[in-house]
Image: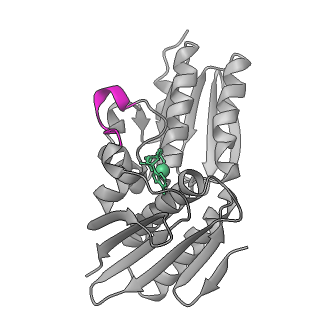
């Protein structure tokens, strides 16, 4: 998995690419969200268009990102999840836990402005 | 290093080698003409169970191996994955979709495999470790 990021005003959009299936590179996303949160950037979108699928390792990392942000008063939104990831979120009942959007722009404008 | 023969891949228990497992499984299934969406489901499950062998079974001991065997039947794919750890009781796994477990970062692997595949059996391997077999209808 490779990770790039861009800033849109107060929001940081993270763009992982490649499957998230475990192994040493899987934790990069989790660490990036932790670093951003620590430096005060607490509105984060993970744009998953470049991740064809993931396994439970990837789901665990998304949950870790969500709780890191929530615990510090931030917010996480997911954008452009693939069909496979959507069905995994459904099977695991995590659809009820994550906010998902059809585009990064929709996700960005869904943050409360403060 | 992974050791690959016709329908079998054997890896030492190093987490980075999960990529090799994914590549091997996907390449074989593509060669057998399995539909892309099923290839993804089967590869998700293969990487789940091999990760379990690497981390929980063999505890990342590179001396211990995880073996994955693929079989192609008339209308189904069968995968058998074995590790060299201690057998565990799969009945004791907590339900990951119970409200109080939803935000746990771990504990969904076997549940996902049971949901996506047709027939999942977990038993003690001959060598004492864990052997997981699952099948998926492809036609
Ligand atoms: N091959 C194995 N050897 C020993 N224990 C295992 C094995 N596979 C699974 N387990 C046990 O079952 C639990 C649930 O596995 P799983 O559903 O994949 O979730 P996770 O791997 O996220 O913990 C593991 O935490 C572990 O205790
Ligand atoms: Mg697991």
Relative depth, front residue between A112 and B104:
B104
Instruction: State the quadrant of the N terminus of chain B.
Output: bottom right
The picture places residue B45, in percent across and down from the top left corner, at 43, 62
Which residue is situated farthest in the top direction here? A114
The picture places residue B29, in percent across and down from the top left corner, at 45, 81
The majority secondary structure of the magenta stretch comes to: loop
The picture places residue B19, in percent across and down from the top left corner, at 63, 65
Is residue A80 something that shows in the picture?
A: no
Q: Is residue B99 left or right of residue B17?
A: left
Above/below status of A28 relative to B40: above
Residue A14 picture quarter: top right
The segment highlighted magenta reads: B93-102
Relative depth, front residue between A107 and B121:
B121
The picture places residue B20, in percent across and down from the top left corner, at 63, 70
Relative depth, front residue between B103 and A99:
B103
Is residue B60 something that shows in the picture?
A: yes
Q: Residue at x 45, y 61 (%)?
A: B44
Q: Is residue B37 left or right of residue B59?
A: left
Above/below status of B93 relative to B80: above
Magenta stretch holds residue B101: yes
Tell me how the rendering is colored: one colour
Above/below status of B94 relative to B26: above
Q: Residue at x 58, y 14 (%)?
A: A72
Instruction: State the quadrant of the C terminus of chain B.
Output: bottom left
Residue B27 picture quarter: bottom right
Q: Residue at x 28, y 90 (%)?
A: B74
Magenta stretch holds residue A103: no
Above/below status of B118 relative to A95: below
Number of callouts: 0
Q: Residue at x 66, y 42 (%)?
A: A27
């Amino acid at each position: 998995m490779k990770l790039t990021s861009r800033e849109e005003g107060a929001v940081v959009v993270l763009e992982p690419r490649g499957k998230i299936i475990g192994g040493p590179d899987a934790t990069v996303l989790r660490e990036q969200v932790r670093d951003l949160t620590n430096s005060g950037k607490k509105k984060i979108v993970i744009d998953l268009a470049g991740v064809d699928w993931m396994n439970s390792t990837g789901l665990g990392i998304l949950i870790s990102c969500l709780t890191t942000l929530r615990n510090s008063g931030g917010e996480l939104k997911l954008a452009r999840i693939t069909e496979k990831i959507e069905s995994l979120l459904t099977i695991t009942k995590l659809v009820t836990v994550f906010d998902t959007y059809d585009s990064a722009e929709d996700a960005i404008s869904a943050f409360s402005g403060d | 290093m992974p050791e690959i023969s016709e329908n079998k891949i054997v890896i030492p228990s190093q987490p980075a080698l999960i990529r090799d497992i994914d590549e091997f499984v996907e390449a074989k299934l593509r060669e057998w003409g399995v539909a892309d969406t099923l290839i993804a489901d089967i590869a998700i499950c293969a990487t789940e169970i091999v990760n379990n062998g690497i981390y929980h079974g063999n505890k990342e001991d590179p001396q211990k191996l995880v073996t994955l065997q693929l079989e192609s039947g008339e209308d189904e794919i069968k995968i058998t994955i074995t590790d060299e750890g201690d057998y565990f009781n799969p009945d004791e796994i907590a339900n990951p979709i119970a409200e109080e477990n939803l935000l746990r970062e771990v504990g969904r692997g076997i549940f996902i495999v049971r949901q996506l595949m047709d027939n999942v059996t977990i038993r003690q391997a001959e060598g004492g470790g864990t052997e997981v077999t699952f099948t998926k209808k492809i036609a």
